[in-house]
Amino acid sequence: MEPAEYTIVQLLDMLGSIDRQKHPERTKALEDELEKKRRAVARLRKALRDVEGAERRTAPVGYLDFLLAALCGVGGLALVLGLLGTAGLGTVTWNGQQVHGLEALGTSVFVALVLSLFSGTLVYVGHRIVRALRHESSAQPSDGTGAATPSEGDASDSE
């Protein structure tokens, strides 16, 4: 067999048992092939790290993201209602009374902040629950037998 047909483990075994003085050409060929395979493994590991890194970069979504998203939606509406209240159109009510002028604008901004905090928190908690459920369901075996199925990562852990 040619050196290219051997695995890294087989090449290491052969290099450990070969008489290097009797077979210098064969030794050199095995060493060259081993080095070539090691470089290929290093390239694959780097590519795998790049792919895993890309997945991690797109995944994280924090509480602040949900809070800002809620503030954008509710805040825009509150700003419009506050400006209309400033003009005296009676769009802002506080404690059962209509608020006008700059008080209407301040009240609507305050209400927007409170509603954003509340709705952003609820959506964030819901998002975390859905992520946990998806993660848990992806850990379940998919063959329908109820038996755990080994993953590809399990094989590498035993080496």
Image (cartoon, rainbow, N blue to C red):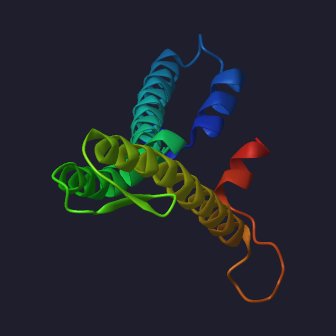
Q: Position of residue 142 (x, y in %)?
A: 68, 81
Observer-nearest of 140 and 133: 133
Quadrant in which the C terminus appears: top right
Q: Residue furthest right?
A: 147
Q: Position of residue 105 (x, y in %)?
A: 29, 44
| 92 in relation to 53, above or below | below
Q: Position of residue 75 (x, y in %)?
A: 32, 50
Identify the image quadrant of residue 141: bottom right
Q: Residue furthest left?
A: 87
Observer-nearest of 29 and 39: 39
Residue at 65%, 18% in the rendered image = 19
Identify the image quadrant of residue 128: bottom right
Is 118 placed left or right of 58 in the picture? right
Q: Residue furthest bottom?
A: 144
Q: Position of residue 3 (x, y in %)?
A: 47, 38
Q: Across the whole image, how many numbered discs are drawn on residues?
A: 0
Identify the image quadrant of residue 54: top left
Observer-nearest of 137 and 16: 137
Residue 20 in view here: yes
Residue at 48%, 35% in the rendered image = 45
Residue 59 in view here: no
Observer-nearest of 19 and 135: 135
Is 37 placed left or right of 78 in the picture? right
Residue at 28%, 50% in the rendered image = 100
Q: Residue furthest top?
A: 21
| 72 in relation to 159, above or below | below
Residue at 80%, 88% in the rendered image = 145
Is 46 placed left or right of 131 in the picture? left
